[in-house]
Amino acid sequence: MTRRGIQWLSAVADDPVMCRAHWADDPRRPCALPTGRLFDVVVTSQRLGMETFDQLVRREMPLGPVMTDRRAQQIGFLLSSKSRDRFTRLLSLETATPPEYRYLDTGSFVVVPGPMPMADDRHQWLRAPTRRPEASPLRTASLAVMFAAASALIERADRYGEQNPSTDATGPEDMSR
């Protein structure tokens, strides 16, 4: 995470100076921050979140900061504050049965990773903030579209696995025959 990313993220804290001081002492330390001031967070399962993240990155779609809580097996996508209505509306245009998620905005808190988490830390950045993210309706639209698409992909893969169980429990077939 860059210095500008730290400045932006810590600005949401009740005491931004104290937050930056804690991170200066221990850059691995996660911090509970209020949502709804500068950003909202869409939280989903790790499986769905990783597929959504992967699809957004591979297609080079607009994407803001993304974090993971390894123990809770959840992924959090940061959006501009006050994006709930837009996200919900766009998601409903993509699917009649939206996947499970929680939307954290005003009145909620989220634990964010420190600026420099280690590989085995519980809270980590998949995409750390490098500066104040531009308020972009495209980020919200991209997340809604890929969230629905990733959910449909996982559902199809699961259905395929149930309909076509592996015939060889010992491993993949020898393709050299």
Image (cartoon, helix red, strand yellow):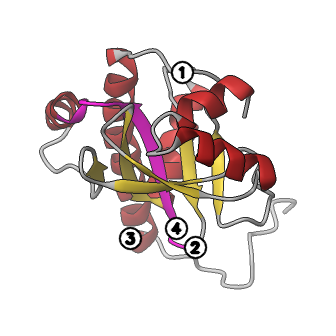
Q: Tell which tag, 3 or 2, sits nearer the viewer.
A: 2
Numbered tag placed on residue 163 in the rendering? 3
Q: Quadrant of the N terminus?
A: top right
Q: Three-letter amino acid code at disc 3?
A: Gln
Q: Position of residue 127 (x, y in %)?
A: 63, 37
Q: Position of residue 10 (x, y in %)?
A: 56, 38
74 falls in the magenta region: yes
Give the quadrant of residue 172.
bottom right
Real-space CA distance between mark 4 and mark 2, rounded to the nearest whole angstrom: 5 Å
Numbered tag placed on residue 73 in the rendering? 4
Q: Is residue 65 visible?
A: no
Q: At x 74% / y 84%, what residue is drawn?
A: 170
Give the quadrant of residue 120.
bottom right
> Would you name the residue on which mark 2 appears?
71
What stretch of residues is rendered in magenta?
Answer: 71-84
Label 2 Cα crowd, 10 Å radius (few <14 / some 14-19 / many 20+): few
Q: At x 61% / y 47%, what residue is drawn?
A: 18
Q: Three-letter amino acid code at disc 2?
A: Arg
98 falls in the magenta region: no
67 relative position to 96: left or right: right
Q: Earlier in the sequence, mark 3 or mark 2?
A: 2
> Would you name the residue on which mark 1 appears?
132
Real-space CA distance between mark 4 and mark 1, rounded to the nearest whole angstrom: 27 Å
Disc 4 + disc 2, Cβ < 8 Å = yes
Q: Tell which tag, 3 or 4, sits nearer the viewer.
A: 4
Q: At x 80% / y 59%, what residue is drawn?
A: 119
**For the residue labelled by badge 1, is the local secondary structure a helix, a strand or a loop?**
loop
Q: At x 65% / y 34%, what residue is drawn?
A: 6
The relative height of residue 143 versus residue 166 in the rendered view (above or below) is: above
